[in-house]
Image (cartoon, rainbow, N blue to C red):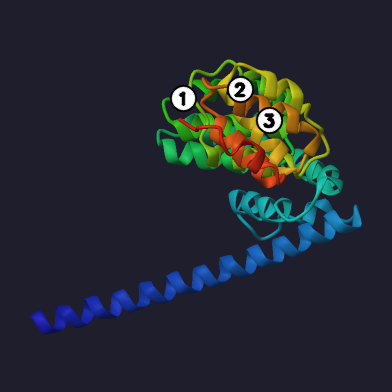
Amino acid sequence: MIILATIVYLVIGSILLIVVHWQSARSAAAESQAIGRIAAFVANRSGDIERLGKGIERFHFVQCLVYVADRVDERAYEPLRVIVKYYNLESLLLHRAMRSGRACERAYLLALLSRLPVSGAVATIVEQFLDDSSPRVRFYALMSLFSYSPYCAIAQLESVDYRLSRRDVSEILTLISRGSCPIPYIPLLMSENYNLQLLGIHLVRRFGITESRAKIASIVRDCHSELREDALETLACFGEAERYSNCTII
């Protein structure tokens, strides 16, 4: 009986494994086809929008759309915005995030949202996540605001009571670089707010704004600045670190 039971379990396990592999292959094929349809729609600015989500679960469709969004520039934003609105994807992600009891899931849903063109109505709802107990949820809520409007996000960033990490700033700048909305760097550099000044320093470094050298140098000269090292590294990127090499970083 023991041998027979073992054989039965093995057979059942093998069948389940085959089913899982089949479902995975089928899902991968559907996602690949969806990505192709989305890419064609975005490239041609026309086509049957109803067919884009055919044969794929709605949440997986969002992931496919994000995959395409990550690989295009701001010129493709309008057709992407049309898709997001037609399939009501903002509501899908936000409703799931609001119902989720797991911080990692809320953060992931907001991360997906932040990589899509979002509307002003969504930005208002996202603000409630800025006070979440999870640092990652708070951050991706902020990222969603940056996706909507960098100016709106910067205003919120000034009022938060936690500090961004260098990794956070890098993600923000990657998102900003996809759009065409210029951000005034001088007010950021002159701000007394840690987060804003940190963002400003790394912004001018990322985009090579050499006109900011005087402002960056003034931060290096400030003995009390916590961002002197970041500022000096930025000057190094501009090839001017030697002029300030005698400044002690504490």
Label whose residue precedes the other's in the sequence (2 or 3): 2
Residue identifier under label 3 = 216
Q: In this orientation, does residue 163 appear? A: yes
Viewer-nearest residue: 156 or 229: 229
Task: Tell me which amino acid carries mark 3.
Answer: Ile
Task: Tell me which amino acid carries mark 2.
Answer: Leu
- For numbered disc 2, what is the local secondary structure? helix
Contact check, label 2 and label 1, Cβ < 8 Å: no
Residue identifier under label 1 = 132
CA gap between label 1 and label 3 equals 34 Å
CA gap between label 2 and label 1 equals 15 Å
Q: Residue furthest left?
A: 1
Viewer-nearest residue: 182 or 217: 217
Label whose residue precedes the other's in the sequence (1 or 3): 1
Viewer-nearest residue: 68 or 154: 154
Label whose residue precedes the other's in the sequence (2 or 1): 1
Viewer-nearest residue: 223 or 63: 223
